[in-house]
Each structure stands twice: as structure tokens, then as C-alpha cells.
Image: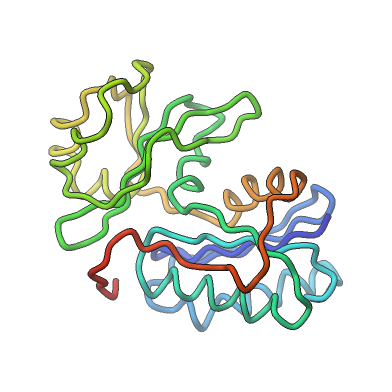
Amino acid sequence: MKILAIETATTACSAALNIDDHGSHRFAIVPRQHTALILPMVDDLLQEAGIQIRDLDAIAFGQGPGAFTGVRIAVAVTQGLAFAHDTPVIPVSTLQALAQHYADDHTHIAAAIDARMQEIYWGLFARDAAGLMQSITAETVCAPTAILDLPPDLPKGKWFGVGSGWATYIDTLQAQFTQTLIGFDGQLLPSAEAIMTLAKPAYLAGQMIAVEQAKPVYLRNKIINN
């Protein structure tokens, strides 16, 4: 099993390579430099492993939500790499990947990415028996004050917040989130490593799509370059 993963939906730019459960990765926080850095990261990983793009079994990518330009870069790079060899691809939610970072420590995660324009990308996740974070509500873009519009029958377990939305709107989110919040990490950014963690079981289950079907998830109609 040889899988490449790419994540560029936020200020972080990262790539990861997994070969038969042996992984390596590259990660950098580089606002507005993703286009220049993502392909060199990929090339570095492939050269280190002694393989080429044609040897990959699948390419996973963070499909968003996130910065419009960043999400578009991940999709475009994935398509560019996969088209020549008809390599199948695996789209992974950026919010889900964000939540997966804390899957070993918490059972319930509230993920929030600052979406600018006084809004956040918001999603709630619960850990399944396999240790993977699974969405329990539809991902959405909303004002921090609008998260109470979510269903009232959410799990009553203790929740942990992750993502830049918590850093930007901590007071508002704490006031609106009626579940038990035991802490948050407002500095955490999604990574290709977390994309890989979610992509491997998807690959083994045959949950891949043709490269022509790879699409970004923006959630909002009005786009801002962030």
C-alpha cells in the first residue's frame, strides 16, 4: 500500500507518504506560499522513499473547507499528479482531519476554522471503535453565534475544541456551546498526517474515486481569498 496525502487548506502546507504502514511527512506554516512548496515537499518524500508517482496506489487530499486558494491548490495538485497514471484519489474533510489530531485523547471534538467575514467552518465529531473521528452533524459555515442552530440531541459527553476558530472567537463559542467543554487548542492546524490516518482505512475499504471526480468543498457561496 503506497499512499500520498496532501493538505493545504489553511496556513499550513503539508504532505505525507505511507508505504505499507511506514510513514514520513513534511509540514510548514507558510501563508500564501503553498503553490511554491507543496510539489517540492512531494518530490522530497518520493525521492527519499525511492519511488515515483506511477508507483502510488492512491492520492489523498484535504478537500476543505478552508481558505479558497488553499483548497483549490490541494485539488489541482492532486489532479495534476493523478491524471497521468489514472491514480485513484481519496477526498478527506479538512475539519475531520483537524479533529483526528486529538482522537487519542478525546472522544468528542468540536472543530472550528476561522473562515473570515465573521464566520467559522464548524463541525462536530465523535471517535468510533476504530479510533477515527466521524462527523455527527453536517459541516457548515456560520457565524460563531449561530452554532446553537445545530440539533439539540447532541452527545452529552465532554467536548474538546480544536482549530483557529476557537482562538479567534473563544468567548463567543464558549458562551454558545452548551455541551461540556473541557478545553481547546486554537493553534492546531490540519496536516497531511491526519489526512493519511483517515485515508488508509478508506483505501482498504475501497472508498476511492476517480481523479475526475475530485472536487473542493467550500461550504460558502461567497468566496474570499484567505
Side of 116 relative to 29 (left or right)? left
Foreground of the two, 92 or 116? 92
Foreground of the two, 56 or 36? 56
Side of 67 relative to 165 (left or right)? right
Q: Is residue 136 above or below residue 204?
A: above
**x, y percentage for residue 90?**
64, 58
**x, y percentage for residue 83?**
70, 80
Foreground of the two, 216 or 171? 216
The residue depicted at 80 percent of the width and 63 percent of the height is 57
Q: Is residue 106 above or below residue 65?
A: above
Side of 130 relative to 161 (left or right)? right
**x, y percentage for residue 80?**
63, 81
Occupied quadrant, residue 10: bottom left
The residue depicted at 76 percent of the width and 75 percent of the height is 86
The residue depicted at 45 percent of the width and 74 percent of the height is 72
Q: Residue furthest top?
A: 156
Quadrant position of the C terminus in the picture: bottom left
Quadrant position of the N terminus in the picture: bottom right
The residue depicted at 78 percent of the width and 78 percent of the height is 85
Occupied quadrant, residue 42: bottom right
Side of 221 relative to 23 (left or right)? left
**x, y percentage for residue 174?**
19, 32
